[in-house]
Image (cartoon, rainbow, N blue to C red):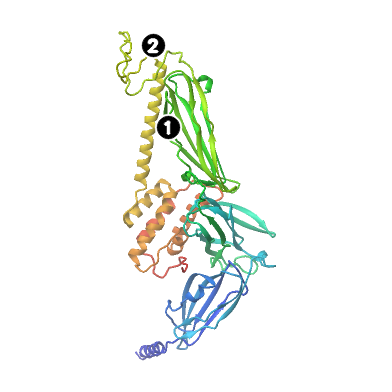
Amino acid sequence: MVRILTSLIITLISFSSLAVNNVTATIDRNPVIKGESFILEIVADDDADSDALDTSALLTDFIVGRTSVSSQTSMINFKTTRSTRWSTVLIAKRTGEFVIPALKIDDKYTQPITVKVLSPQDSGQAVNRDLFITNEISNTELYVQQNVTLTVKLHFAANLKRGSLSEPQLASAIIKQLGQDKESDAIINGRRFRVIERTYTISPQQSGDFTLKSPLFSGEVQLQTSGGRSSFFSFGETKSVSVIGEDINLTVMPIPDSANGQWLPAELLAVHDEWQPTPEEFKVGEPITRTMTITAAGLSEEQLPKIELAEVPGLKIYPDQASLHTSMKQSRLVSQKVQSFAVVASKPGTYKIPAFEVPWWNAVTNRQEVARIEAQEITVLPNPNGVTTVPTFNTVEQPLSEPQAPINQSQPRQPVTVVEYKTPWLQWLFLALWLGTCLLWFVSAKFKKSKKAKEQTIPKNVNEYYLQLLSACKQGNGERVMSLLVPWLNLKLTQEHSNKPPITNLAQATQTIDNLAFTEALNELQQAYYGKTQQTWNGKALFNALQQVQKSAISSNNDQSLRLNP
């Protein structure tokens, strides 16, 4: 009993004397390189509130990343000592000398620190870089709604454990990722780097001078000993890193007053057509296929104009559905629209096809141009099967047993199309097959669309997300899993911890969920889809891991998601 009372008294005395007496601030290296992260560490010699550190004073000269907080308590000979430690990831915005100001913890202040920031091109600095980003843009002077491409390359020589790359930012612009990430190797200054390449299309919607903000990479690398190998005690230990590339200045010009028609700013725009069968084989009643193609460099496929053919007396024109394609050629966005038209002549003769024009603005020469297909003449021959006219939907066919009556020119014409007594069975067979094909295509498209919509119905609550995740794992649909995982975890976080900040990507998901099986299964999924060689993914491991995560609660102290201050 005496010992218990003594311990209680000592504990009460120690709690009553809690107070921060000293606060120190250090950085892990000096000088630092612009665009690369370094660690600011602040230590208080007693317990302190984890939110006691205010980093807003650093935002002027630095990008402030994630801040981790840890506390330590030890007791030796009834003497209790405590400390609280804050580690903050910083990235310098500019080169030069800057001061990390005095930061306040309770009523104590740290000492200011002078930081020297070097350019990556400074002598001797580029050689030692383990992680950096390069940005390449196809054009820095462009027009409103013109598309340019930004290629972002993440180079890393360190053992990267996990990470995420944010999107570039530009005010009043449409930014889309083009295709999937590409991985490669490169030798730079005698060192081997792995390179992850990502391409974006950027279309400004307002004119003026803007700054395109570089993507920011945040992740963790495995710590290594001085010999370059991980020791037994350092195995699994990681260090938070962040890196950002150079911002890019853009000049966006407004729509010129001399521009006519639909606004199509492009570096190149061309149109052409093809006829099938050959012009020597055009016959009455037999469909002629005219395929029109618009190709543009610097426009997205959504910007390509609608293809409409002018009406020609004696010709029936039936448009097919247009197909759109987008690709990269010589770091330029190239879009293409291809549309076919079935043209059927009602009688033999020579038909004049009007010219087809697409006005566009040449962003290279800064002038209005017109892509044009010149007017053409086609000759339609009589059909050897005896077809002189083409039946239409309101056609009235005369009985075969009665001769045709001559048409009285004084009477108003009726919607009657005359067909010879010889039945054009080949024509009817072709039309029946063509209509049957169209019907099958329509039913198939509707079925696929409804099936896809059913599969991707947006869940309403956390349980529906969970059930759809399990279903996607069973089906081996990794893309569906990756689209559902983050929303599901955010709903689960909201239910269990209302003050928990949301996560935004898969890297933060593995950091938030403290489950080794879940982390390994998710890494296996991403490797199958984004590795050097894509593999067939088996969702069994992630299926089992998700069941474990669903049954357990997310720890409130396991918040390791990356959060950047605005």
Q: Is residue 425 visible?
A: yes
Q: Quadrant of residue 442?
A: top left
Would residue 37 appear left or right of 513 to someone viewing this image?
A: right
First in residue order: circle 2 vs circle 1:
1
Mark 1 neighbour class, 10 Å CA radius: few under 14, some 14 to 19, many 20 or more? some
Cα separation, mark 2 vs mark 1, equals 30 Å
Q: Which mark is residue 319?
A: 1
Q: Which quadrant: the N terminus?
A: bottom left
Q: Amino acid at mark 1?
A: Pro
Q: Is residue 505 above or below residue 392?
A: below
Q: Residue at x 32, y 16 (%)?
A: 397
Q: Which residue is mark 2?
A: 422
**Could you say where residue 70 lies in the image, as x and y percent from the top left?**
47, 75
Q: Residues within 10 Å of mark 2 (few under 14, many from 20)?
A: few
| Image height of 464 relative to 427, above or below | below
- Element at badge 1? strand
Residue 416: percent from left, percent from top: 32, 18
Spot occupied by residue 470 in the image (x, y as percentages of width and height) = 37, 51
Question: What is the tally of numbered marks visible in this picture?
Answer: 2
Q: Residue furthest front?
A: 410
Q: Quadrant of residue 16?
A: bottom left
| Amino acid type of the residue tagged 2 in the rendering | Lys
Q: Where does the image place residue 112, in percent across and percent down from the top left?
A: 55, 81
